[in-house]
Structures are given as C-alpha cells and as structure tokens.
C-alpha cells in the first residue's frame, strides 16, 4: 500500500490550498484516512480524518470551520480543502491510513501507512 500526498505550496494568509492523498494497493472494507501536520520544532498533530465506509469525520479544533475533508472512493483519494489559511498552518502535511478501524482516528499511533508529506507555507 502506498499513499501519495500532493498539493502543497506557498500561499498568502487568507488564501486556500487543496491537498490530495491518493491511495494505491489493496484496501480493507473499513479504514480511515487522516491528515497530520508537523511544524518545525513541534510534534505531529492530527488535523482531520475521514472513514471510507460511512464518511465519519474528525477535525482538530484549530482547523474547524476552515478545512474540509472529503473522499472519492472510486479513486481511493481523499482531499483536504484548506481555506482562510493562517501562518500557523505552515507545516509539512502528511496523509496516513488506518487499516481495519471503525470511526475516525486522531492519533498517529492508530495509523499503519504514511505518505511522504507535502509542504504548506503560509506567508506574505
């Protein structure tokens, strides 16, 4: 199983970006796909998560109302639409998959597979 994250870049405060996480390989009936981020000198933080079967969603408080996660099961792809970006959103963003779980997961320890990360920089 491989996860490919893309869509990062440089954006001004208040701007938007859409991250994409494409999953390849055999997937189980129940799994969750999450987005995490890690800023320099900080611990990895769970940002959002969505389950493949019933679409249950989790958002960190820091991104609620600004970020929207969605999925396209036919393409095994998850998107993270990020609006009203702030400088504190600057980080490397990773997507990850938690196999065989029910319900969204916010802890990195719940995840089995990780993508390579994509850098998001919010700066004027």
Image: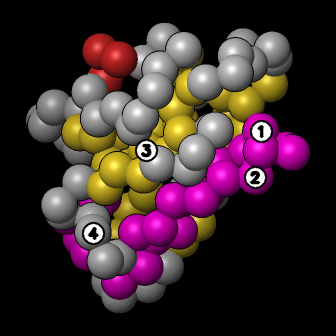
**Magenta span covers which residues?**
67-92
The alpha-carbon separation of the residues under discs 4 and 3 comes to 12 Å
Corner quadrant of residue 109: top left
**Mark 4 near mark 2, Cβ–Cβ under 8 Å?**
no
The alpha-carbon separation of the residues under discs 3 and 1 comes to 14 Å
Q: Earlier in the sequence, mark 4 or mark 1?
A: 4
**Mark 1 near mark 2, Cβ–Cβ under 8 Å?**
yes
Q: Earlier in the sequence, mark 3 or mark 2?
A: 3
The residue that disc 2 covers is 72
Q: Earlier in the sequence, mark 3 or mark 1?
A: 3
The residue that disc 4 covers is 64
Q: Label for residue 76?
A: 1
Which residue is more in the foreground, 106 or 87? Answer: 106
- Circle 2 — which element? strand
Quadrant of the snapshot with the N terminus: top right
Q: Is residue 28 above or below residue 103?
A: above
């Amino acid at each position: 199983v491989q996860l490919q994250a893309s869509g990062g870049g440089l954006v001004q405060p208040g701007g938007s970006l859409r991250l994409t996480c494409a999953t390849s390989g055999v997937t189980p009936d129940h799994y969750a796909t999450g987005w995490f981020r890690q800023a320099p000198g900080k611990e990895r933080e769970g940002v959002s998560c969505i389950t493949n079967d019933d679409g249950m969603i989790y958002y960190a408080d820091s991104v609620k109302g600004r970020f929207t996660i969605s999925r396209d099961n036919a393409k095994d792809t998850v998107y993270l639409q990020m609006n009203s970006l702030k400088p504190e959103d600057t980080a490397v963003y990773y997507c990850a998959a938690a196999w065989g779980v029910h319900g969204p997961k916010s802890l990195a320890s719940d995840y089995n597979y990780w993508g390579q990360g994509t850098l998001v920089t919010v700066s004027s």
